[in-house]
């Protein structure tokens, strides 16, 4: 049995006529807490059980859940390189739209305001901006795949650090 | 649209989030079994727990699950459902899904394939509106740069370039002067092709001081009734944030004209199902124009339900079964006013940055005239793949001030922790004088944000 909104209203009416300030109800299927606040009541409820999934017609490829997402990028820091990380969890895109050229390629030069990639979170495209001048050394995330927040997306060799070979 | 009727006993819900919860609620009351079609990321969501059954339709990415017609049809057949409820967004206005349902012997809870195609093409919808005698925003199709310039000199600047395949605020560009027209047209055409697979665009006059007012309609393929107006002018980047019914501060003659126009449009289509005819009210000229029709249940439908006492999901199911309308226009009675706040998982102080993650605790106001449509509970997860709507708080009162007062109280009692949400923004917004007076334009929300930023910069808070 699950409680409906109507059930909650009936309980609330009964409760409101008493001097109690809180009601806590829990079964193996649901949990309900009603509390008296200054201007009225509040409800905190939770459904605790789920039906067993029906067998799908065709087994879809194992999708990622929020808790267990594939870690694509290797988080090991590389000395002298600046890591560009995902501002939010989301889908990583190397190009502004499907079929168009990537924002940057390995070896490409970037300026402070160069857009390196997009990360789509909750239907919103967020630009990933370089924030420094340098050269792209590595692209760590795969196009159109999910990345965790703060995952390393690209590595950049910043200007101004003169390596021995270039003198 | 023929006289055939059927009985729907089991519905596959091809959606997620609060609208899935909403459909389940009505089905439970009607004794209809529900099967939730969920992506892998939503298999342990609150609606998946609430439904009678749950079936996986693919991986988290919506293009492989919620937007996959074949997967949805296969789930409908596999689950032995009689009908598919598409909710809003995703495939809700997809003519291909309506067609595939028909071919598979499933009832599509929505309009016909032809009606979806007609209103989905914004130019066809415009032509239909003109034919039905509705005023449309001055404008039209622009196939060549020359056509665009001729049309633009007619319309005047600023104007909007809109994608024929767009709608709902997507695929629009503003042009301020003639010299920007060619360049912006090229960009709009390229983007329309990429986003909607249709490069066609049309031009419309940009109405600076406008209100977004819409009329809810319900049809059975023959008769159409309207269920009143809603004002959805509080928007950010064309996304609605707060809606109310009926539209406040509107002359009765204008309101009646909008009702009549919406019914005329739907009747011309011999519309079957629940739909919304959107209008742009030009405040300076005290007139209104047809914008588009949404052929689905909408996010803001609860405010209409609250003032007319109908369950719109129940009516949707009834007409999908092939039954006649159960309410006549004279039988629709309006009572009081209702206002809805959309609470999103976003940080409104940081340019509405999305905030997915786990909700540690949620606690909603409960009481007379308060309704909460949500798929949140303490411990629920908000995946980063989908939109950011987490709850709708709706208050109903005997009049608008009573509804606003209830809403303000309910917002204060509501608690959401673990993620950022727009709850606090709504607490501030409902206290603003222009909102209290009612009838603000679509420019209002940006002004509210600016005034608030000015207060913050002044160190008052």
Image: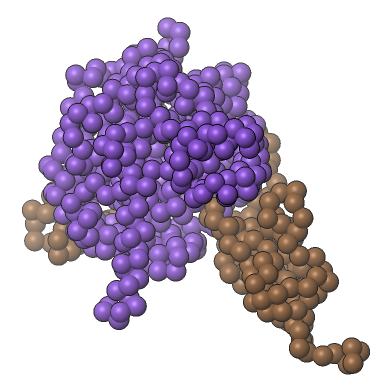
**Of residues A12 and B361, the one drawn nearer to the viewer in this rendering:** B361
Q: How far across and down, in percent of the image, does residue A70 sit?
A: 68, 62
The answer to whether any part of residue B38 appears in the image is: no
**Image quadrant for the C terminus of chain B?**
bottom left
Q: How many marks?
A: 0
**Residue at screen point 68% across, 36% down:** A58
**Residue at screen point 32% across, 30% down:** B216
Chain A image colour:
brown
Q: How far across and down, in percent of the image, does residue B110 sit?
A: 46, 25
Looking at the image, is B120 positioned above or below residue B446? above
Chain B image colour:
purple
**Residue at screen point 57% across, 36% down:** B148
**Residue at screen point 37% across, 24% down:** B134
**Of residues B345 and B399, the one drawn nearer to the viewer in this rendering:** B399
Left or right: residue A23 versus residue B104 is left
Q: Residue furthest top?
A: B3
The answer to whether any part of residue B273 appears in the image is: yes
Q: How far across and down, in percent of the image, does residue A61 sit?
A: 70, 46
**Image quadrant for the N terminus of chain B?**
top left
Looking at the image, is B266 positioned above or below residue B198? above
């Amino acid at each position: 049995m699950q409680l409906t909104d109507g059930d909650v209203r009936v309980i609330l009416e009964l409760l409101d006529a008493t001097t109690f300030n809180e009601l806590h109800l829990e079964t193996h299927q649901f949990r309900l807490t009603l509390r008296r606040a200054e201007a009225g009541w509040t409800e905190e409820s939770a459904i605790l059980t789920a039906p067993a999934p029906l067998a799908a017609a065709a087994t879809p490829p194992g999708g990622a859940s929020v808790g267990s997402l594939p870690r694509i990028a290797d988080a090991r820091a590389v000395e002298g390189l600046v890591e560009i990380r995902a501002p939010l969890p989301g889908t990583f895109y190397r190009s502004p739209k499907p079929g168009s050229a990537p924002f940057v390629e390995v070896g490409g030069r970037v300026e402070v305001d160069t857009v390196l990639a997009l990360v789509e979170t909750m239907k919103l495209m967020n630009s990933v901006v370089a924030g420094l001048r340098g050269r792209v050394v590595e692209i760590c995330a795969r196009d159109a795949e999910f990345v965790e927040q703060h995952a390393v997306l690209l590595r950049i060799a910043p200007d101004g650090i003169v390596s021995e070979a270039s003198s | 649209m023929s006289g055939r009727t059927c009985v729907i006993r089991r519905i596959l819900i091809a959606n997620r989030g609060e609208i899935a919860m909403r459909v389940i609620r009505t089905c439970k009351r009607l004794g209809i079994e529900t099967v939730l079609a969920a992506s892998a990321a939503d298999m342990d969501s609150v609606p998946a727990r609430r439904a009678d059954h749950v079936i996986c339709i693919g991986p988290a990415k919506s293009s492989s699950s919620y937007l996959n017609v074949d997967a949805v049809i296969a789930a409908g057949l596999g689950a032995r459902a009689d009908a598919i409820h598409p909710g809003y967004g995703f495939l809700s206005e997809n003519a291909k899904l309506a067609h595939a349902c028909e071919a598979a012997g499933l009832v599509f809870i929505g309009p016909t394939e032809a009606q979806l195609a007609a209103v989905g093409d914004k130019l066809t919808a415009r032509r239909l509106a003109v034919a039905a005698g509705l005023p449309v925003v001055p404008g039209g199709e622009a196939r060549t740069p020359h056509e665009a310039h001729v049309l633009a000199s007619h319309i005047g600047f600023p104007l909007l370039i809109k994608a024929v395949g767009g709608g709902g605020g997507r695929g629009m560009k503003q042009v301020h002067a003639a010299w920007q027209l060619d360049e912006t047209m090229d960009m709009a055409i390229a983007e329309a092709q990429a986003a909607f697979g249709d490069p066609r665009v049309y031009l419309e006059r940009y109405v600076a001081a406008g209100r977004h007012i819409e009329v809810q309609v319900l049809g059975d393929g023959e008769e159409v009734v309207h269920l009143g107006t809603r004002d959805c002018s509080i928007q950010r980047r064309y996304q609605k944030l707060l809606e109310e019914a009926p539209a406040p501060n509107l002359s009765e003659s204008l309101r009646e004209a909008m009702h009549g126009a919406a019914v005329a449009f739907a009747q011309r289509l011999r519309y079957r199902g629940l739909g919304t005819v959107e209008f742009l009210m030009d405040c300076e000229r005290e007139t209104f124009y047809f914008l588009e029709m949404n052929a689905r249940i909408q996010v803001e439908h609860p405010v209409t339900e609250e003032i007319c006492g109908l369950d719109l999901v129940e009516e949707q199911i009834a007409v999908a079964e092939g039954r006649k309308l159960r309410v006549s226009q004279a039988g629709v009675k309006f009572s009081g006013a209702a206002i809805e706040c959309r609470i999103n998982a976003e940080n409104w102080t940081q340019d509405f940055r999305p905030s997915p993650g786990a909700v540690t605790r949620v606690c909603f106001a409960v009481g007379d005239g308060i309704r909460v449509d949500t798929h949140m509970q303490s411990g629920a997860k908000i995946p980063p793949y989908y939109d950011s709507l987490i709850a709708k708080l709706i208050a109903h009162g005997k009049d608008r001030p009573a509804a606003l007062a209830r809403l303000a109280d309910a917002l204060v009692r509501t608690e959401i922790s673990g993620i950022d949400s727009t709850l606090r923004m709504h607490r501030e917004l409902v206290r603003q004088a222009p909102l209290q007076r009612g009838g603000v334009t679509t420019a209002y929300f940006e002004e509210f944000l600016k005034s608030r930023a000015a207060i913050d910069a002044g160190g008052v808070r």
